[in-house]
Amino acid sequence: AIDPEFEQNRETVDEHEGHDVWGPVDEPEELGIHGTHVAVDFDICIADGACLEDCPVDVFEWVDSPDHPESEIKADPTHEAQCIDCMLCVDVCPVDAIDVDAG
Ligand code: SF4
């Protein structure tokens, strides 16, 4: 599961589509965590798609992740600023790859 303390345990190494990327990143095998308010651990994401389907405000978009061991696409929290903290994505993710900081 994603580390809920990632902001303490990791450092930002990049920015992607307006959100932070928390390392370590070593492409293509290691992609880090994308987003901060809505954080998706790309190294856990298996591209199940439930978060894209269920998010009421369309926070997520697919991005390509060729040659990543878990999946060739990832659910990117592109529009994390729109999040309304409903926690649906956290509940439906089958691999617990998502952390939403509703506090
Ligand atoms: Fe979307 Fe709700 Fe998840 Fe926020 S908590 S990203 S609104 S599903």
Image (cartoon, rainbow, N blue to C red):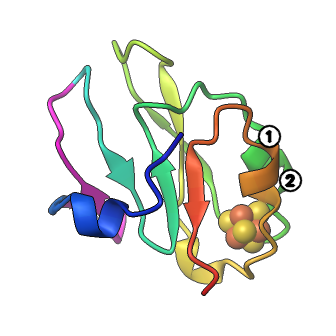
Three-letter code, disc 2: Asp
Q: Amino acid at mark 1?
A: Ala
**Quick one: quadrant of the N terminus?**
top right
| Residue found 59% across the figure and 24% down from its top | 46
Q: Residue at x 25, y 29 (%)?
A: 30
Q: Is residue 77 above or below residue 40?
A: below
Q: Find numbered disc 1 in the image and state the secondary structure of the residue it sits on.
A: helix
- Taking the spot 26% from the left edge, 56% from the top edge, the residue there is 22
**Quarter of the image where one finds residue 43:** top left
Q: Is mark 2 within 8 Å of ligand 1?
A: yes
Question: Residue 81: image x %, image y %?
Answer: 55, 81
Left or right? Give the position of 20 relative to 69. left
Q: Is residue 58 visible?
A: no
Image quadrant where one finds the C terminus: bottom right
Front residue of 94/3: it is: 3
- Nearer the observer, 47 or 43: 43
Give the image location of residue 24, x and y in percent: 17, 43
State which image quarter holds ligand 1. Answer: bottom right
Q: Which residue is mark 2?
A: 54
Any atom of ligand 1 within 8 Å of the CB at mark 1? no
Residue at 53% over, 59% down: 77
Residue 19 forms part of the magenta stretch: yes
- Alpha carbon separation for disc pair 1 and 2: 6 Å
Q: Contact, CB < 8 Å: mark 1 with mark 2?
A: yes
Is any part of residue 12 visible from this angle? yes
Residue that mark 1 sits on:
50
Is 98 included in the stretch rendered in magenta?
Answer: no
Say above or below: 3 vs 75: below
Q: Is residue 91 above or below residue 71?
A: below
Looking at the rendering, the stretch of residues picked out in magenta corresponds to 14-27
Q: Determine crowd level at label 2: few under 14, some 14-19, many 20+ residues with C-alpha closer than 10 A.
A: some
